[in-house]
Image (tube, grey):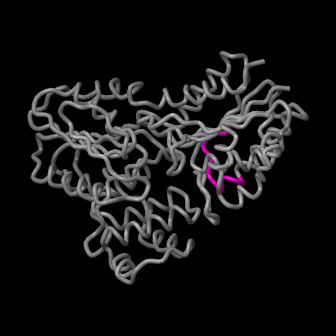
Amino acid sequence: MVNPESFLKALFNQAVKTAHPDTHLASALSSLDKTSQGRTIILGAGKGAAAMAAIAENYFEGQVEGLVVTPYQHGCSTKIVEVVEAAHPVPDDAGQEVARRILALVADLKPEDRVIFLVSGGGSALLVLPADGIDLKEKKRINKQLLYSGASIDEINCVRKKLSQVKGGRLALHCAPATVHTFAISDVPGDSPSVIASGPTVEDDTSIEAALEVLARYNIHVSSAVTAYLEQQDKLDYRHLPKRNSFEIISTPQMSLDAAAEFALSQGITPLILGDLEGESSDVAKVHGGIARQVLHYAQPIKPPCVIISGGETTVTVKGRGRGGRNAEFLLALTLDLKGKKGVSAIACDTDGIDGSEDNAGAIMLANTYGKALNKQLNPRAYLENNDGYSFFEALDALIVTGPTRTNVNDFRAILIQA
């Protein structure tokens, strides 16, 4: 038998390592010439933007310059590319100023110039420039409501794209006639380029009607100016996108799940990958709990020792006033569902190292966690109803704290079952 805590932490570390820019970006860049007849402008937005920029600036030669935006505390040392830190998940003035500077940087580009755009999860909030007539305060209010509503990332980004001067292919339109090469770390189920960071360099595949429907479905309050803007907005003419506009995904959630599965096999543990999942965190936890019980009691669909692995991006409809992100919420709901089943342990963390807006990546649940909670007079259901997973696991010294990982392929969940 493996040590549950050590095994689960090693599994998560393997998933993060596989998703880091160091693993794949240099190889992807090698498909491009190091030098260019014109300027090479390195731009980027996301949790991995600074780490990606540090790699890219060491590859290209000649007239190279650049500017990227990443969350606070996600920066790293660069020689050429300027790194600016801004707020995430709710945007701030720093992100807006960077977006303005990026548009100024790509103004008047020539056909011989090229833009290297480095994008990763978090780019939607970090690279923010509201459409004309909409101020940042309004955009922040809408963004915050969407984040708390339980809307999926596809739905959130559908709205974001319609209210932006850079998202939904608009950045690429500003870059024409230069060549644009985008390298992305995917943090979205399905890896759609138009959803990753709201697709600044690719054609928007959603409609105005879809955005209005999302706002109505989740009862998102917007000003009359926003409603009028959406209803009167013309469809973008993507015929003016750069003729040479490539997009390559270098890391995906599935790659990290596969790497974790390979590590499990090396330890004599059979993996079962459920893939990228969406839905309310507590509901997803109940499904995982049901599978764990079936494995434990009937050896179906696989026999112990085994590990159930999943990724994706769940949601939390916030009703309480507690602390914690979707991974702590998932694990708290799983703890309540399993009630200390012998031989079952689990981990749930965000691969960017930040669960929601807290300082932890997630948390770990061992077979004795439920019993320890009751001994400490911690009521799991009360904590769950208050959306307070952080405080629950903090009281049990079970938070996972990694600090920023400078990548993001979303959630990582693993349930170890040893009979």
Q: Is residue 344 magenta?
A: no
Q: In which quarter of the image is residue 150?
A: bottom right
Is residue 363 positioned above or below 389 on the image?
Answer: above
Q: Going by the image, does 131 lie left or right of 265?
A: left
Q: Is residue 275 magenta?
A: yes
- The magenta region covers 274-283
Residue 212 in percent (x, y) is at: 47, 74
Q: Going by the image, does 295 lie left or right of 278?
A: right
Q: Which residue lies furthest to the right in this view?
A: 297
Residue at 26% across / 54% down in the picture? 171
Q: Which residue lies furthest to the front in this view?
A: 376
Is residue 267 positioned above or below 240 on the image?
Answer: above
Q: Quadrant of residue 217?
A: bottom right
Q: How many marks?
A: 0
Quadrant where the C terminus is found in the figure: top right
Residue at 51% across / 44% down in the picture? 359
Residue 199 in percent (x, y) is at: 37, 52
Residue 341 in percent (x, y) is at: 85, 37
Between 179 and 345, the one lying in front of the other is 345
Q: Going by the image, does 30 lie left or right of 106?
A: right
Quadrant where the N terminus is found in the figure: top right
Is residue 210 positioned above or below 380 on the image?
Answer: below
Residue 95 in percent (x, y) is at: 30, 55
Residue at 49% across / 36% down in the picture? 252
Between 289 and 359, the one lying in front of the other is 359
Between 344 and 291, the one lying in front of the other is 344
Is residue 364 positioned above or below 215 on the image?
Answer: above
